[in-house]
């Protein structure tokens, strides 16, 4: 089992019981989604934008016109990319003990703007993370489209993982005498039935890899 | 129909067709969730953390130990709070035309650290946004708990909204001849069946407002 190196800013300060330095936890959090929140500094102010990503064992690939603008201003600028899954509500007897169950990964670093082969590889990773099977099914980017796409890579070397799970914990407090219900309400993203484009020609069947999203 | 004032940084630069300045769109995006991503600057580097929020017509309330730390360093520090809903995949004939359907609100400003009555009001708004009905059902915070809670407020004066919806748009391109399936796969968060805490005393019924989450 490998560990993520801890740096000053990835040191867990609050809710330390939720912090993890296990690489497999980082990989699992990244594998479970495809939209991250990218933080950059623009004119001295933080800016947080959602963007699409894909991850391998050592690299996070993400789309980023905002990040590439920030990189052009300062090629050494560091960013923070955060991936969060909201897993449900933890409803205690007291409001104070309420919480959200979640899994979250934060990655820090200076992203690289990709070109050529590496850009194509990254786009494949990103596309496959959003819709597995789609890279080989759809028409892949040509040279012109590739040039018009901004893709960035961030090494997965400096990262922080937090996982909050489990039931509320005020069952052994005086609040348990209140006779109130306490427990979890799980939450998860669910894909619905695919909706064909209105202009889709008749007779084109839904491919199995897209149908399979609903059972993910 | 009211409009959100446009400032230099909320001016939509990319994908302008997706930008909205309608206050009702901002309100709808904020009402549809309860977890935001807060961006602050710590030691010159952006930091993006997920946190719980609640919104009224003019104020966003959010939990924030990170933000309060940043505010103690610099009471005038501006933050960016982003709320994103991922509504699905837009799968085109070509990878280049692929996209994510989403609704996103970004709010800029200098948050205020709340005290006393205003803090209690804000906590009520936030709790009710996560689990409507829970504020009156659970035991509300006492003085000591309130003091131990960091709650911040951000005015909804400087905000930017983006909404991407609809089918892929390459049906009139040469790619339509490829005979590939194209369309949307919707995605939405779904609450599951409530799970009672393992130490919940027998005979405590699930209250209707929690059961109702599943149909939300």
Image (tube, coloured by chain):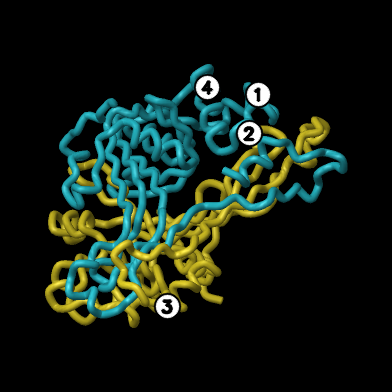
Chain colours: A cyan, B yellow
- Which image quadrant for residue A175? bottom left
Mark 2 near mark 1, Cβ–Cβ under 8 Å? yes
Which chain contains the residue that carries disc 4?
A
Q: CA distance from mark 3 to mark 1?
A: 57 Å
- Residue at image mark 3: B207
Q: Chain of mark 2?
A: B
Q: CA distance from mark 1 to mark 4?
A: 13 Å
Q: Label 1 is found on which chain of the structure? A: A
Sooner in the amino-acid sequence: mark 1 or mark 4: 4
In front of the other: A143 or B116: B116
Query: Picture coordinates of residue B197 (x, y %)?
Result: 33, 64
Q: Residue at x 48, y 69 (%)?
A: B213
Q: Which residue is mark 2?
A: B96
Same chain for labels 2 and 4? Say yes or no: no
Callout 4: few (<14), some (14-19), or many (20+) C-alpha neighbours within 10 Å? Answer: some
At 39% across and 40% down in the image, what residue appears? A29
Same subunit, labels 2 and 3: the answer reads: yes
Q: Position of residue A134 (x, y in %)?
A: 64, 32
Q: Which residue is mark 4?
A: A121
Q: Work out whether residue B157 or residue A108 is closer to the camera in this orientation and state it.
A: A108
């Amino acid at each position: 089992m490998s560990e993520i190196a801890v740096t000053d800013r990835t040191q867990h300060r609050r809710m330390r019981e939720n912090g993890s330095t296990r690489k497999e936890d980082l990989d699992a959090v990244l594998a479970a989604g495809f939209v991250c929140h990218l933080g950059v500094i623009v004119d001295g102010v933080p800016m947080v934008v959602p963007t699409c990503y894909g991850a391998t064992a050592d690299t996070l690939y993400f789309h980023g016109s905002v990040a590439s603008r920030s990189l052009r201003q300062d090629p050494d600028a560091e960013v923070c990319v955060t991936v969060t899954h909201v897993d449900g509500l933890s409803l205690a007897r007291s409001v104070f003990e309420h919480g959200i169950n979640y899994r979250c990964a934060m990655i820090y670093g200076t992203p690289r703007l990709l070109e050529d082969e590496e850009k194509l590889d990254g786009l494949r990773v990103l596309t496959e993370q959003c819709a597995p099977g789609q890279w080989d099914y759809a028409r892949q980017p040509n040279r012109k489209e590739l040039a018009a796409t901004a893709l960035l890579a961030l090494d997965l070397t400096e990262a922080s993982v937090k996982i909050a799970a489990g039931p509320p914990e005020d069952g052994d407090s005086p609040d348990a005498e209140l006779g109130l219900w306490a427990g979890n309400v799980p939450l998860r993203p669910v894909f619905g039935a695919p909706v064909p484009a209105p202009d889709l020609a008749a007779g084109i069947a839904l491919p199995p890899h897209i149908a399979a999203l609903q059972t993910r």
